[in-house]
Image: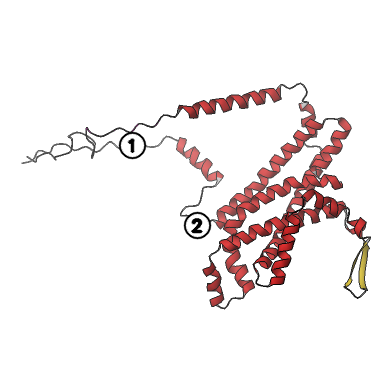
Amino acid sequence: MAAPLKGVAQDHPLGSSEDDVEAVPLRRPWRWISAFIVLILLAWFIVTVATNPNLDFATIGEFLFDPRILSGVGLTLFITVVSMVVSTLLAIVIAAMRLSSNPVLSSVSWFYVWAFRGTPQLVQIVLWGYLGLLFDKIRFGIPFTGIEFWSIDTNTLITPLIAGLLALTLNQAAYSSEIVRAGMVSVDEGQREAAYSLGMSPVYTFRRVLLPQAMRVIIPPMGNELISMLKNTSLLSVIAVLELYTQASIISSSNLKQVELLIVVSAWYLFMTSLLSIPQYYLERRFGRGTTRNLPPTPFQRLKAAVNNRKPGPEPAPATTITQVVGE
């Protein structure tokens, strides 16, 4: 008859003993208390707003999809996309100039960033709107020669919409160039040296080696700048650009429902910021490949995993036990 194993309790799960310590999770009552307080405050706020007699919910529903509001939404998205695309391209050029060894290029790019970051954006918008007071005509020709090929009235060319696009684009390019430059600096210097050793030109190295690696650092803050750009379009109301906030202001000036129209505007801004956050997430996920072992799951993958986890699974296998073996 085989002797039982020493040091292992009989008829107990494999590797367990009577001396094992059962782990008890640490109790954190303040988590539940703080969560309860937050829920109470949230419920109080919702009830207060919903039962406020001074708030006309019918007006909110009436103007939420008003054609003028929808027109403002479309123009707001147009201004945001055009300004962000052009400013990003310009920012790449400015960042390359800042990193250049040419003192003229680096000095000019530094002055550009200093000037546009150092003055309020609202002032820049108004200045572009008043450009016709500085120059009655915009002329194209050979400088310092008096030779002129083409000219046009400034107010004809620089409409309020064009002035707003110029102001937002040039201001955003200054901020975005610093983001691009920080992303470029984050790339190891050995990458540049290896590219040069292979005979690549500085421009080709920047475009094919440095910039793709820098995108992992550039994308998150650029997403935040995109959201800021969307909200900054409301500043164009000072030069009468008919974007979302301007349209809501015109409507509220006629029906005196300022708060209700502001709620409509806020709802649309929340919807648009949520919509623009989707491509940012997938861009971060794409350029994050190779930096982590496993990519973070997408919202659809999280939802699928949550649904699958709620389904009943197979019964767990019984615990392995050691019993006494009787043999001849």
Rendered image: mark on residue 316: 1
Q: Residues within 10 Å of mark 2 (few under 14, many from 20)?
A: few
Give the percent coordinates (x, y) of residue 81: 73, 53
- The one nearer the camera, 239 or 314, is 239
Residue type at the position of mark 2: Thr
108 vs 245: above or below: below
Residue type at the position of mark 1: Pro
**Which quadrant of the figure contains the N terminus?**
top left
User: At 60% from the left edge and 54% from the top edge, which residue is drawn?
Assistant: 283
Q: Is residue 226 left or right of residue 185?
A: right
Kindly tell me whether residue 242 is visible in this rendering.
no
Give the percent coordinates (x, y) of residue 58: 78, 27
Q: Residue furthest bottom?
A: 199
Q: Is residue 260 left or right of residue 203?
A: right
Q: Quadrant of residue 94?
A: bottom right
307 vs 202: above or below: above
Kindly tell me whether residue 228 is visible in this rendering.
yes
Rendered image: mark on residue 251: none
User: At 53% from the left edge and 28% from the top edge, which residue is drawn?
Assistant: 34
Rendered image: mark on residue 291: 2
User: At 66% from the left edge and 26% from the top edge, which residue is drawn?
Assistant: 46
Q: Quadrant of residue 14?
A: top left
- The one nearer the camera, 223 or 118, is 118
User: At 12% from the left edge and 38% from the top edge, which residue is drawn?
Assistant: 4
Magenta-tinted stretch = 18-26
